[in-house]
Amino acid sequence: MDSKKRKLRLVGNSVMISVSKDFLAKNNLTIGDTVFLDEDKLKEAITKKNTHDDSKIDFLMNPSIQEHHETYKDLVDL
């Protein structure tokens, strides 16, 4: 599956998701065409991007883990 990052944009009272010109060409579509959208299939195709970065969390937690290693170990063993 070829995933692309896109932003949801407000256009008037509607929300828009852009598609590339390459996608239009591959699917024989042109600007102004009327298309049908299967929202059930679209729901499966869209995934919200996580707003946090696990590597940043690990970086911030690492000093605490090193300093309190024995305490954390004791908590896990309860």
Image (tube, helix red, strand yellow):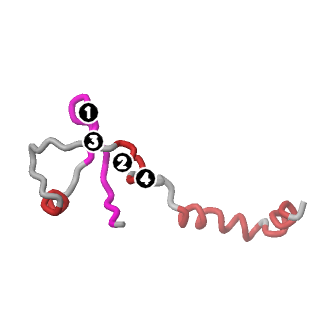
Q: Secondary structure at mark 4?
A: loop
Residue at x-position 36% and y-position 66% = 1
Relative placement, left or right, of 27 versus 42 is left
What residue did someone put label 3 on? 9
Cα gap from disc 3 to disc 1, whole angstroms: 8 Å
What residue did someone put label 4 on? 47
Cα gap from disc 3 to disc 2, whole angstroms: 17 Å
Residue at x-position 58% and y-position 61% = 57
Looking at the rendered structure, the number of numbered marks drawn on it comes to 4
In the rendered image, residue 32, in percent from the top left (x then y), is placed at 9, 43
Q: Amino acid at mark 1?
A: Ser
- Determine whether label 3 and label 4 are within 8 Å by CB: no
Callout 4 crowding tier (Cα within 10 Å): few <14, some 14–19, many ≥20: few
Pick the front one: 18 or 40: 40
What residue did someone put label 1 on? 14
Residue at x-position 26% and y-position 33% = 14
Q: Main secondary structure of the magenta part?
A: loop
Q: Secondary structure at mark 3?
A: strand
Q: Amino acid at mark 3?
A: Arg
Provide the residue span drawn in magenta.
Answer: 2-17
- Of mark 3 and mark 4, the one earlier in the sequence is 3
